[in-house]
């Protein structure tokens, strides 16, 4: 059981124990997209394929368009 004390607004947040942050279960992979997305494409997909893509994207915590873009980037980089 953790007992928390009231924090002083002027207290430095880095001046305390942060060992809880080191637990690997709390980490999440992040990808920074720095390149501008300035082109739009239109693509026709079957309803079944789009549904499967949306399901996989949701499981990965992404919107389906970003999921498709990342899949294409990985394919091209491979």
Image (cartoon, grey):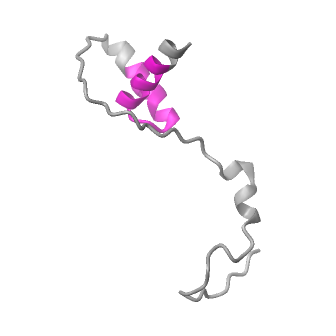
Characterize the magenta stretch by its predominant secondary structure: helix
Please identify the quadrant where the N terminus is shown. bottom right
Relative height, residue 17 to residue 20 (above, below): below
Magenta includes 59?
A: yes
Q: Quadrant of residue 8?
A: bottom right
Front-most of 12 and 61? 12
* Highlighted magenta segment, given as a residue range: 51-73
Residue 78 place in picture, x, y as percent: 56, 12
Residue 65 place in picture, x, y as percent: 35, 28
The residue at 51%/19% (across/down) is 74
Relative height, residue 19 to residue 3 (above, below): above
The residue at 24%/18% (across/down) is 41
The residue at 45%/34% (across/down) is 58
Residue 52 place in picture, x, y as percent: 43, 20
Front-most of 5 and 73? 73
Say how many tags the image has: 0
Is 34 situated left or right of 45 in this image?
right
Magenta includes 11?
A: no
Residue 37 place in picture, x, y as percent: 31, 31
The residue at 73%/49% (across/down) is 24
């Amino acid at each position: 059981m953790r007992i928390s004390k009231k924090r002083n607004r002027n207290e430095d947040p880095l001046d305390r124990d942060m060992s809880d942050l080191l637990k690997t279960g709390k980490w999440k992979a992040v990808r920074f997209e720095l390149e501008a997305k300035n082109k739009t494409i239109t693509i026709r997909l079957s309803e079944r394929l789009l549904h499967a893509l949306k399901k996989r994207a949701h499981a990965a915590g992404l919107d389906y368009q970003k999921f498709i873009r990342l899949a294409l980037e990985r394919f091209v980089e491979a």
